[in-house]
Image: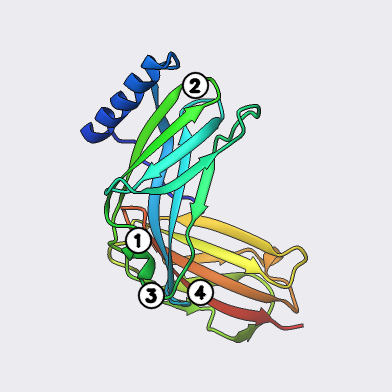
Amino acid sequence: MTVTIVRRPLPKVLLAAGALVGASAAQAGGWQGVGEFENATIRVERNATDGDTEIVLTAKPLTDEGLVRLSILSPHWRKVVEVGAPSKTPGLREFLFETPEPEGSAILDQYPEGTYLYFGTATSGQRFVGSAELSHELPEAVTIVVPIEGSVIAPGALTIIWSAVPNAAQYIVEFENESAEPEQSFSFLVGPATTAFVVPSALVVPSSGFQVGVASVHENGNIVFSETTFSTAH
């Protein structure tokens, strides 16, 4: 899925923390300047149909180098991510972390709202700092009007229809053919004024089971999914 990322100036607390990291590295002879993260995000994803919630974190430094270490700290300076790569490898550059998905909102107790700090060390020794804001505010869930849960429809073009959500910045539409081997999955991003999407006839094949998901995306990046399943006739 695609969510728009907006890079903002680093908060003063993060710059100060980065300065401390840099000073320590300089004393050790390894300081080569501090860089930023091209992508540092944290968001809530809730499945309104299944009733579970998870936290998703992403990180990508503004460099072509890989990282040999990445740490992410909560607003209370508790480490929520600590990963490393062997020093003799090229390191890792893009990161995606997903928490477990307990029922309800239990996971939010472990991830308080506020500024999460990102610290990385590249293979060259260069340090990177970044930040991301986590909010627990969620958009309303959409109601999928078409297709109806458990329905059997004729193969061919399908118009997915859902209810509008007042505070949605955009919608994500997911379409999966669960009968295909391997399973086929497509994801589309549409604007907040859109409440219908046409799936081409070539994708809605006969004698197959499908899942449709439509997510409302809040301006803060948080996502709430609704899902439904249907099948096609022979």
Looking at the picture, does residue 51 appear above or below residue 220?
A: below
Closer mark to the observer between disc 3 and disc 4: 3
**Residue type at mark 1?**
Gln
Q: Which residue is mark 2?
A: 125
- At label 1, counting other C-alpha atoms closer than 10 Å, the crowd grade (few under 14, some 14-19, many 20 or more) is few
* Image-quadrant location for residue 192: bottom left
Q: Which residue is mark 1?
A: 110
User: Can the viewer see residue 9?
Assistant: no
Q: Which residue is mark 3?
A: 104
Q: Secondary structure at mark 2?
A: loop
The answer to whether 232 appears left or right of 64 in the picture is right
Q: Which residue is mark 4?
A: 227
Q: Secondary structure at mark 1?
A: loop
Looking at the picture, does residue 4 appear above or below residue 55?
A: above
Residue that protrudes farthest toward the front in the picture: 28
Q: Label 3, label 4: how many angstroms apart (C-alpha)?
A: 17 Å
Which label's residue is closer to the chain start, 1 or 4? 1
Instruction: From the viewer's side, name the closer residue of 112 and 44.
Output: 112
**Residue type at mark 2?**
Gly
Q: Label 4, label 2: how many angstroms apart (C-alpha)?
A: 45 Å
**Residue type at mark 4?**
Glu
